[in-house]
Amino acid sequence: MEILTADFFLSALTGGLLIGLTAPLIGIFLVLRRLSMIGDTLAHVTIAGVALGLLINIYPIGVGLAFAVAASFAIEKLRKAYKGYAELSIAIIMSGGVALASLFFTLGMGYNTDVNSYLFGSIYTLDQVDLYVVGAITVIVIVAISLLFKEFFLLTFEEDAASVSGLPVKFLNMLITVLTALVISTAIKIVGALLVSALLTIPAATSLLLARSFKQSVVFSVVISEIAVVVGLVIAGIWNLAPGATIVLFLIAMLILTIIGKRGLSA
């Protein structure tokens, strides 16, 4: 139990709670817009940036963040080019991210261990710089959603109506994608690139089964995410398990219990 009061665990808890707040805030909009796979795409691109950062000895998360933001702009450009096939832009960018990551892995075979920590998460290694970056992005996401909540709501459910009403639809679409890139690029060190989309989608999926309104679903998704982060980290700390995997598995358990509970009530 001493691990729960250790400095590295408290840093991990702080970083986890911050990502547990921002990921579902963005994720609920992505899920409702049927863009859930964008999380995996940007995660793969971020890993390519991380690999390059390790290769040239520059702050990996910073390079990964730059790659993710650039990819978010590319996704929006391709979505406009293929309006009837929005998912095609996601597939193209994911392919490019995987290809670049593979190339940089080949060039830097000596840092495979470091790359693995970003693939599977290394929340216990968060330092002050990481926490500052996560904290800054948390502020950006909260401010953006607070100021533009109504606009994002209309964009999510009636994009055509949002355009007719004079809202800057292109800017709002780009902003959501960029915010997603920022969240994912910082979250990969916490739960890993292979699991990061779970923080975006599973809390949203669970909240949609429970909520009676959009605002409720936003609140519930954040609460569910934070519970999973705290419980997952405590379980991982006590039994020496992989923290990222434990958080995601607990999220899945909460989703399954919610589905079973809903079926029981409706039976």
Image: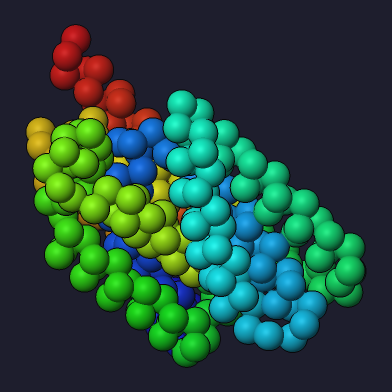
Instruction: Tell me, yes or no, if residue 201 can be seen here.
Output: yes
> Taking 222 as reference, is 116 above or below it?
below
Residue 39 % position (x, y): 49, 49
Identify the residue shown where x is 45% and y is 75%: 12
Residue 46 figure quarter: bottom right
Quarter where residue 4 is shown: bottom left
Q: Nearer the viewer, residue 170 or 61?
A: 170
Task: Please state the horizontal and vertical placement of residue 9, each as a whole percent of the image.
Answer: 46, 78
- The quadrant of the image that shows the C terminus is top left
Tell which of 91 and 220 is nearer to you: 91
Residue 219 appears left or right of 185: left
Image point (29%, 67%), residue name: 141
213 left or right, relative to 157 = left
Nearer the observer, 45 or 2: 45
Quadrant in the rendering for residue 109: bottom right
User: For the view shown, which residue lies furthest in the top direction?
Assistant: 267
From where the camera sits, is residue 187 visible?
no
Residue 181 vertical placement versus 11 (above, below)? above
Instruction: Please report the residue visible at 29 percent of the width from the left and 45 percent of the height from the top.
Output: 29
Give 51 or 89, whichever is nearer the viewer.
89
Image quadrant holding the N terminus, namely bottom left
Which x, y percent locates residue 156?
Answer: 25, 40
